Amino acid sequence: MMDEVLEQLATAVESDDLEALVRPFLSILERVSGLESTYMTRIDTDRGIQEILFARNSGDLTVAEGLTVPWGDTLCKRAFEDDVTWATDVPTRWGDSAAAGELGLVTYVNEPVTIGDDRVYGTLCGASTVRVPESADARRLMRVFAKLIGRHIEREQLLETLRREHDSYRTFALTDPLTLIPNRRAMVSELTRALANAERRGEVLHLAFIDLDGFKQINDTYGHDAGDRFLIAIAEKLQNALRGGDFVARIGGDEFVVFGPCSSDAPDAGRRAMRERLSEVTSGEFDLGVARLDYAGPSIGAVNSSPGERDCETVLARADEAMYAIKRSRNRRRVVNG
């Protein structure tokens, strides 16, 4: 028997899974104590419930795994309040317990499973319909098992917290904090991936470089809060103009990039259509809070990726150059018209 117990223990403590840890413990506890049922619970005092997570039933007594019961009606709560860990007189001690009466319980034992600063997570329990005298070995095992389970749960919760923090950090690192759209780092990563896919499939990407003409004047005239509102509004309009597979990012103070796959057999026409669509949605009236701005629109340079092109900086540079050509042309028109 001892060899089997040691083998079960070795298997359990090497597990990274709570269930794989607890089930051997329940089996060992049942064999050492002679109890008909051994089980582990989780207590949610905010919701006022206790849930039986894992159970082992070796006799006529059946404690249903997965059962959820009101915390106020449980023997666990009564045992905590009475400071009782091993009771062999359930019918007389807790004779008004409907659950204990229905199950015909005579013996009930429990050990709290605590985590952190002694916060009770749940219990390690045992029960029987006959009188089972307290066993020093069983009590020691229950205490040891409860501590091991508590530490395992703490480790699981810590790992989950670290995973969430990592995901949050990764999201933050790839997101522009003002507009909440992807930033330059995210754009470079996604554009590199998109170019590689386009080369493999023999496809073309459209890419538009957008510079918000007059943005400094908006800040100087209406204030930085109005400027922030304008950037947020532009980001929203660009997002709403995206087609399936398109990507938008804010890559600088007043610079945005939009790219996506060519959806037709006429790449040049598709590129022009993309530029016109983006120009249309980023022009017009904007509510800046302190004023309503009639915006003439940004300078937008749009290019197609070349066959086999995989360097995202090269594509961006060509789009940037195309954008400045548009900006110079618009400035010349303003001079002539002025």
Image (cartoon, grey):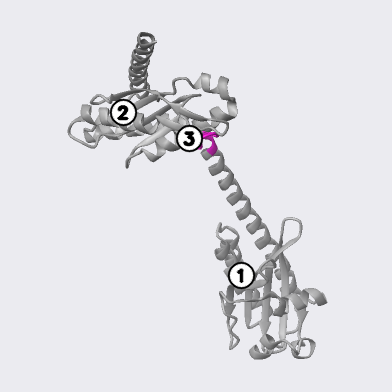
Residue 98 screen position, x and y as percent? 69, 88
Residue 101 counted in the magenta span: no
Q: Amino acid at mark 2?
A: Arg
From where the camera sits, is residue 165 visible?
yes
- Residue furthest to the right: 82
Q: Secondary structure at mark 3?
A: helix
Q: What residue appears at the point 60 percent right and 86 percent down from the top-left corner?
A: 61
Left or right, 328 with respect to 31, comes to: left
Q: Which residue matches tag 2?
A: 275
Question: Between 306 and 17, which is closer to the camera in this rendering?
Answer: 306
Where is residue 288 shown, x and y percent of the image?
53, 32
Q: Check residue 233 in the rendering and tell me which mark sits there, or answer none.
A: 3
Marks 2 and 1, the one that precedes in the sequence = 1
Q: Where are the magenta residues, as a range?
A: 172-181
> What kind of residue is marked 1?
Val
The answer for how far apart the CA atoms under marks 2 and 3 are is 18 Å
Residue 5 circle label = 1
Distance CA(mark 2)–CA(mark 1): 72 Å
In the rendered structure, the answer to whether residue 122 lies left or right of residue 288 reads: right
Q: Is residue 158 above or below residue 218?
A: below
Mark 2 near mark 3, Cβ–Cβ under 8 Å? Answer: no
How far apart marks 3 and 1 lie (CA) works out to 66 Å
Q: Nearer the viewer, mark 3 or mark 1?
A: 3
- Examine the image and state in which quarter residue 13 appears: bottom right
Considering the image in quadrants, where does the N terminus appear?
bottom right
Where is residue 40? Give x, y as percent.
Answer: 63, 71
Q: Nearer the viewer, residue 154 or 287?
A: 287
Q: Among all residues in the image, which is located at the extreme front?
A: 338
Q: Residues within 10 Å of mark 3 (few under 14, many from 20)?
A: some
CB contact under 8 Å: marks 3 and 1: no
Quadrant position of residue 219: top right
